[in-house]
Amino acid sequence: MNTMLSKNPNERSSTSALGSMKVSDTHSFIRSIISLVSSGTTASRVSDDRALLAAVDRTTSGITLRATGSPEATQKSISELRRLSGLTWEQLAKLFNVSRRSLHFWASGQPLSRFNEEQLNRLLEAIKYIDRGSANLNRSLLLKGSNGNQFFDLLVAGKYEEFKKIVGFGNAPQKPKLGSLSEDALVARRPQNPAALVDALQEPIHREVGRSRPARAARSRKNNSGQ
């Protein structure tokens, strides 16, 4: 106890909430350093860098810093990423270097870390950039590549800018924006009042009167016995 009190206030802050805030402030600084050298990293180095960034999301007490976005926004982003990319849950989990179970948890509304939130936003932005107009076309493009490497691998390695530069802008056709209907059109589309339909008179059935031959009475032939 006396040892703690004898410490300099700046030294004690590392174990307090202020120390946690300092760790959080270094998060963006480490991201910028890793982004400068990411172009020359290998797959194993990228995995190490991701582990380092994930560790920065933890405070000195070991608590993972949650994302700043709402669970609804996270659910919407994951749903849109899956819809545009056409990838399976297993493939999407590989992009985040997590299990498929973790991805399902995020999609159900459970919070994710700030690092994973930023990764989700960058992945979605990259897929929107190369969007060819349909999930099938986008998935086929992601699983293709050159020199034996798939474009999908660039996303796994976190090389989003290189991925966009190589694949190119998708220029997907935009869906036409439909304007709102006028008041007259809305009135015309409204269903009629059920009470008015009940009281409505039945319209007479119009029958076409034409020239027809009169029916002949059928006579039964009796046999010799009279039957």
Image: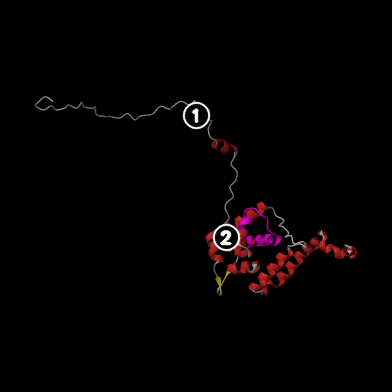
Q: Which residues are magenta?
A: 103-124
Q: Quadrant where the N terminus lies?
A: bottom right
Query: Which residue is at 74% across, 65% downward?
Result: 56
Q: Residue at x 79, y 61 (%)?
A: 20
Asked if the residue under mark 1 is in contact with the one under mark 2, i.e. CB atoms within 8 Å, the reply is no
Foreground residue, 131 or 139? Answer: 139
Image coords of residue 95 (percent x, y): 61, 64
Question: Any mark on residue 179, and which?
Answer: none
Residue to which mark 2 is pinned: 89
Q: Residue 157 appears at what percent x and percent y?
A: 63, 69
Q: Nearer the viewer, mark 2 or mark 1?
A: 2
> Which kind of residue does numbered mark 1 sit on?
Leu
Front position in the image: 212 or 89: 89
Q: Indicate left or right for 209 with 122 as reference.
A: left
Q: Position of residue 217 (x, y in %)?
A: 20, 26
Label 2 secondary element: helix
Q: Position of residue 213 (x, y in %)?
A: 24, 29
Predominant secondary structure in magenta?
helix
Is 214 drawn above or below residue 8 in the view shown?
A: above
Q: Label 1 crowding class (10 Å Cα cut-off): few <14, some 14-19, many 20+?
A: few
Colour convention: secondary structure
Quadrant location of the C terminus in the rendered image: top left
Res 35 → quadrant: bottom right
Circle 1 is placed at which residue position? Answer: 197
Badge 2 crowding class, 10 Å Cα cut-off, few under 14, some 14 to 19, many 20 or more, is: some
Which residue occupies the foreground of this view, 84 or 70? 70
The amino acid at mark 2 is Trp
Front-most of 175 and 39?
Answer: 39
- Please report the residue visible at 59 percent of the width from the left and 40 percent of the height from the top: 182
From the viewer's perspective, tell me whether residue 205 is left or right of residue 28: left
- Reading the chain from its start, which is encountered first: label 2 or label 1? 2
